[in-house]
Image: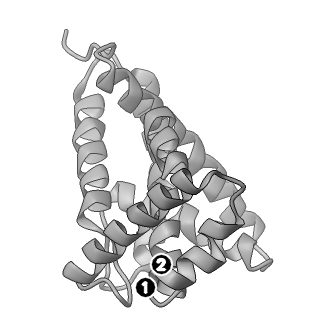
Amino acid sequence: MLIAQQKKKDNIAEYLLYMWQVEDTIRANSMDIEKIKHNIIDRFDQPEEVKSEMAEWYENLIEMMRLEHLEKGGHLQINKNVIIDLSGLHQRLLKSSKEPFYTAAFYKTLPYIVELRSKAGDDKAGELETCFTALYGVLMLRLQKKEVSLQTMEAVKQISTFLAILSEKYKQDRDGKLELED
C-alpha cells in the first residue's frame, strides 16, 4: 500500500506495473487474505498498525477483483483507468506542437509496438497497454530467471525510455506544470 502510494506519486508507469504484479500476487495466493498475510505482510518489518493497514488494502483489492471477476486474469478497473488517463495524455502530447521530443520518442518506439501487436493475434491491446504488457512480460521472465533475447531487450529499453517520458509528462500535467496549448 505504502509502496503503491509512493509509486503513484513519483512514477505512474512503475505504479501500474507494480499494481499488475500485486494482482498476480493476489491470484498466486488464491485470493486468500490469510495466505497474503503469511506470505507477504508478515515479512515486512513494520508496526502492527501498518501491517493492519496493508491487510485492509489487500482485502479491498481482493474484493474488487472478485466483484470484477478477475480471479483467473485481467486487470482491475482502477488500473485500466490509469491506462485510459495515460492514453488521453498521450494523444494530447502527440497533437501538441510544444512536444516534439515526446513525439519523436513515440515514433522511435512505434516499430516495436507494431511488432508486438502483430504477435498478439486477436487480442490486440492499445499502444500504451502493449508497451506495459511487454515490460511486465520481461519483468516476469527475469523474476523466473529465464533468458530474454537481445532483440527483446532492445525493444524493452526503447519502450522503457518512452514510458519514462510519458510518466514525467503525467506528473507535470497532474501538478499543473504541463503547457500543451499554443
Residue at figure coordinates x 55%, y 59% from the top left: 51
User: Closer to the camera, 168 or 52?
Assistant: 52
Q: Residues within 10 Å of mark 2 (few under 14, many from 20)?
A: many
The image position of residue 10, as x and y in percent, is 50, 33
Q: Residues within 10 Å of mark 1 (few under 14, many from 20)?
A: many
Rendered image quadrant of residue 65: bottom left
Mark 1 to mark 2 CA distance (whole Å): 5 Å
The answer to whether mark 1 and mark 2 are in CB contact below 8 A is: yes
User: As shown in the figure, which amino acid type bears the numbered disc 2?
Assistant: Ile
User: Closer to the camera, 83 or 56?
Assistant: 56
Q: Is residue 76 above or below residue 121?
A: above
The image position of residue 162, as x and y in percent, is 51, 41
Q: In the rendered image, which residue does mark 1 sit on?
A: 31
Q: Which mark is residue 131?
A: none
Residue 93 in view in this figure: yes
Judging from the image, the colouring scheme is one colour
User: As shown in the figure, which amino acid type bears the numbered disc 1?
Assistant: Met
Is residue 103 toward the left or the right of residue 15 in the image?
Answer: left
Residue at figure coordinates x 55%, y 66% from the top left: 136
Q: In the rendered image, which residue does mark 2 sit on?
A: 26
Residue at figure coordinates x 52%, y 46% from the top left: 2
Residue at figure coordinates x 38%, y 21% from the top left: 172
Query: Element at badge 1?
Result: loop
